[in-house]
């Protein structure tokens, strides 16, 4: 009751009527001081005791918008080139420094108990300067410096007390209340029943609270992920993703075959409502689908606040009847009125306005036709030719409809072409039907190990009537180099003889 009464004045805080749209740190501090409304606690302990007065301005632009600890190193006064490498996150920094003499490193982060630092894995004393900033001394020479935020005995004890208190409350609610001073039987029965009715839901709430404190607040789960140094678990971070000064794509994930999940991080409050465009292109470069979402993360982007992280989910417009097929994915942030995309500031090429975030595919149905060769002819230990289905004869000038079957043994990085040659009685090539698998819709770089690929083809034959032989193989389009065939003799080391074909008049 005492704590609740103490906090009541802060439930309905005095409103700052003249507040600017984006107040500076100095303006926010002034408002808090004048009105007695502080940022973190009802007592206003938002600065350490070593800070003589609140800061008047930011130490550098963006220092309060997700800057990592290594970026907060005060480099003023350090010798040029003394910091050879730097990395880290919000509560840690790894530095490689080369100093001509003993130097005090200062960070634009306030010192609280719990900060620890090591130089070449040896602990050093960490303290605060006259402004309350984190400081420690590094000896001369080249060193590896590590700074981390860790728990203190007081914080560990507080966590233990919290867990024990939650457990005690849960147990107390679940234990029946007995007293020798209960009213008459009917009244007592009614009260005990009422308490029993409350015990179960209160006990459930206590258990949920315990799970939150002990599990959700500390560990990743299907309900909550904790960012690690800016990286979101189970996602891929794009090579670049800063759309203007406002929004960045922090990560993405493909779920199953046709679901895309995006994570947006806000650096500055967007000036307007933007839309997100997801584009699909087939491997031939032909547009295959597009989604434009005017409310990414089911909200207007103009309401996004700096530091927020948004979960954004999309069902991709793919057609399962086209399988096997592959797509390339691109993501852009656009003006919904003009359709113009925001420029990516960190892209390697100026003027880039969309992110290539990978590809998605609809795998082939794994149903294999019967009466196939299955001889195990393997190209480059990667692709196995397991058979073909084609007629034994075709009329001159007619279209030959046939199907090739392959099994992928391991992933390949190159998109190979399939050659199909018609050989005469002397083994000379008289016609060809080269092309990528599936007319270019499912290149070999999309194939997964153990996947069976059905390649349906059509060939208008215009050769003299006679007896012919069909051979197939793979080659790289840019160089013409053929894939070697495993276990074949020297005369036919990169092609497979499929079967004979009679062309009738």
Image: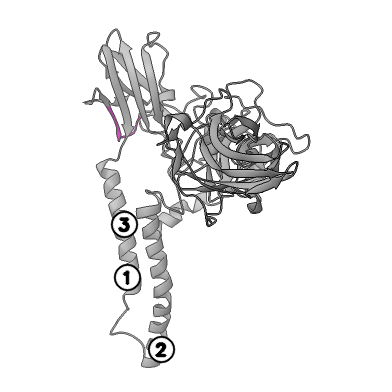
Q: Is residue 116 magenta?
A: yes
Per the rendering, the mark at residue 187 is 2
Q: Nearer the viewer, residue 11 or 465?
A: 465
Per the rendering, the mark at residue 123 is none
Q: Quadrant of residue 88?
A: top left
Check disc 3 and report its element: helix, strand or loop. Answer: helix
Please, which residue is most extreme toward the bottom here? 185
Residue at (63, 41) in percent of width and height: 467
Q: Is residue 131 visible?
A: no
Q: Is residue 280 rendered to the left or right of residue 238?
A: right
Check disc 1 and report its element: helix, strand or loop. Answer: helix
Q: Nearer the viewer, residue 305 or 452?
A: 452
Residue for badge 3: 163
Q: Nearer the viewer, residue 254 or 422?
A: 422
Mark 1 or mark 2, which is nearer to you?
1
Check disc 2 and report its element: helix, strand or loop. Answer: helix
Tell me residue 349's x, y (percent): 61, 21
Q: Is residue 17 rendered to the left or right of residue 176?
A: right
- State the CA–CA distance, disc 3 to disc 2: 36 Å
The stretch in magenta equals 111-117
Image vertical order of residue 242 relative to residue 373, above or below: above
Tell me residue 114's x, y (percent): 30, 35
Residue for badge 1: 172
- State the CA–CA distance, disc 3 to disc 1: 14 Å
Residue at (41, 28) in percent of width and height: 69
Tell me residue 66's x, y (percent): 49, 32
Mark 3 or mark 2, which is nearer to you?
3
């Amino acid at each position: 009751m005492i704590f609740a009464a103490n906090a009541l004045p802060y439930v309905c805080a005095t409103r700052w009527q003249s507040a600017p749209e984006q107040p500076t740190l100095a303006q926010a501090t002034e408002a808090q001081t004048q009105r007695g409304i502080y940022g973190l606690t009802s007592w206003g302990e938002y600065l350490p005791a070593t800070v003589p007065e609140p800061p008047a301005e930011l130490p550098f632009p963006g220092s309060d918008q997700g800057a990592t600890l290594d970026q907060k190193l005060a480099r003023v006064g350090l010798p040029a080139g003394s910091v050879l490498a730097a990395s880290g996150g919000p509560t840690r920094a790894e530095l490689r420094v080369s100093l001509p003499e003993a130097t005090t490193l200062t960070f634009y982060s306030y010192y609280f108990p719990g900060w620890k630092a090591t130089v070449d894995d040896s602990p050093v004393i960490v303290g605060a300067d006259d402004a309350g900033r984190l400081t420690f001394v590094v000896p001369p020479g080249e060193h590896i410096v590590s700074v981390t935020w860790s728990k203190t005995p007081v914080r560990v004890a507080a966590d233990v007390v919290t867990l024990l208190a939650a457990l005690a409350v849960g147990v107390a609610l679940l234990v029946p209340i007995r007293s020798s001073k209960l009213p008459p039987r009917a009244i007592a029965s009614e009260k005990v029943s009422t308490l029993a009715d409350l015990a179960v839901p209160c006990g459930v709430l206590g258990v949920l609270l315990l799970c939150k404190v002990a599990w959700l607040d500390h560990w990743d789960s299907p309900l909550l992920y904790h960012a690690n140094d800016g990286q979101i678990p189970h996602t891929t971070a794009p090579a670049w993703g800063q759309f203007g000064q406002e929004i960045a794509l922090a990560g993405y994930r493909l779920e199953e075959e046709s679901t895309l999940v995006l994570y947006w991080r806000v650096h500055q409050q967007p000036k307007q409502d933007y839309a997100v465009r997801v584009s699909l292109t087939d491997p031939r470069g032909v547009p295959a689908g597009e989604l434009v979402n005017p409310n990414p993360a089911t909200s207007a982007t103009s309401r996004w606040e700096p530091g927020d992280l948004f979960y954004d989910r999309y069902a991709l417009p793919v057609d399962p009847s086209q399988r096997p097929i592959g797509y390339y994915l691109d993501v852009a942030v656009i003006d919904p009125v003009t359709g113009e995309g925001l420029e990516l500031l960190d892209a390697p090429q100026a003027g880039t306005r969309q992110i290539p975030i990978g590809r998605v595919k609809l795998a082939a149905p794994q149903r294999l036709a019967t009466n196939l060769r299955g001889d195990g002819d393997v190209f480059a230990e990667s692709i196995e030719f397991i058979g073909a289905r084609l007629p034994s004869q075709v009329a001159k000038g007619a279209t030959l409809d046939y199907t090739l079957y392959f099994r992928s043994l391991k992933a390949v990085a190159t998109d190979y072409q399939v050659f199909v040659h018609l050989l005469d009685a002397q083994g000379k090539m008289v016609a060809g039907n080269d092309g990528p698998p599936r007319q270019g819709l499912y290149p070999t770089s999309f194939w997964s190990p153990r996947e069976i690929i059905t390649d349906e083809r059509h060939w208008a034959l215009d050769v003299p009537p006679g007896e012919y032989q069909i051979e197939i193989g793979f080659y790289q389009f840019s160089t013409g180099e053929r894939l070697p065939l495993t276990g074949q003799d020297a005369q036919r080391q990169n092609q497979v003889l499929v079967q004979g074909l009679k062309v009738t008049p």
